[in-house]
Image (cartoon, rainbow, N blue to C red):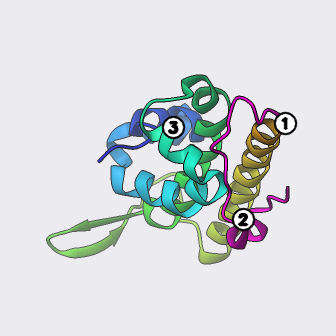
Amino acid sequence: MKTLITPGEVSSLAFSQADGISGADINEASIASAERKFIRPALGELYDELLAGGHAQLADLYIKAPLALYVKWLLLPSLALRVGPMGVARHTTDNLTPAGARDISLARRRVKADARALMQVAVEHIAANPGLYPSFSPQVGLKPDMGIVL
């Protein structure tokens, strides 16, 4: 499955080294889901050009950071859980206590707000340069949820 960002890039852009999250902890389905939910609606046909390898500098400078945060937002609830042959288990250690639902909700809210802000910067850059991005065509119905208003 083709995506705009690799699991390793998500790991380095959205998580600190102290988090201990590597590219191996991030699946491509979560990346594809974040792209379809947040990036494609914000960019319209321009997303398809990015996916085909066009506008690499735009992707690197403006799109990958918010995309990585949207992937983190999707993954946060499940990062403390592991699914195995015995069912779903929660990680515990001697030094850490698993976060509660409220803590996870607050963390997700902050991550999504940061992703929205960075996506807003991207959209403003694209809109300010219509000659460079003529295929930019955001899907109007989804912009308010993303915090993007043109």
Q: Is residue 148 magenta?
A: yes
**Residue 93 is at least partly visible in this image:** no
- Decide if residue 89 is on the left or right side of residue 14: left
Point 67% across, 68% down: residue: 103
Residue in front for this viewpoint, 101 or 36: 36
- Decide if residue 131 is on the left or right side of residue 19: right
Point 61% across, 60% down: residue: 41
Residue in front for this viewpoint, 13 or 15: 13
Q: Which residue is mark 1?
A: 128
Q: Nearer the viewer, mark 3 or mark 2?
A: 3
Identify the amino acid type marked 1.
Answer: Ala
Disc with the residue nearer the chain's start (3 vs 1): 3
Say what secondary structure mark 2 lies in: helix
Q: Which residue is mark 3?
A: 50
Identify the amino acid type marked 3.
Answer: Leu
Callouts 3 and 1 close, C-beta under 8 Å: no
Identify the amino acid type marked 2.
Answer: Arg
Dot label at residue 38: none
- Mark 2, Cα crowd under 10 Å, few <14 / some 14-19 / many 20+, is few
- Decide if residue 148 is on the left or right side of residue 101: right
Range shown magenta: 128-150
Q: Is residue 14 magenta?
A: no
Residue 80 placed where, x, y %? 44, 62
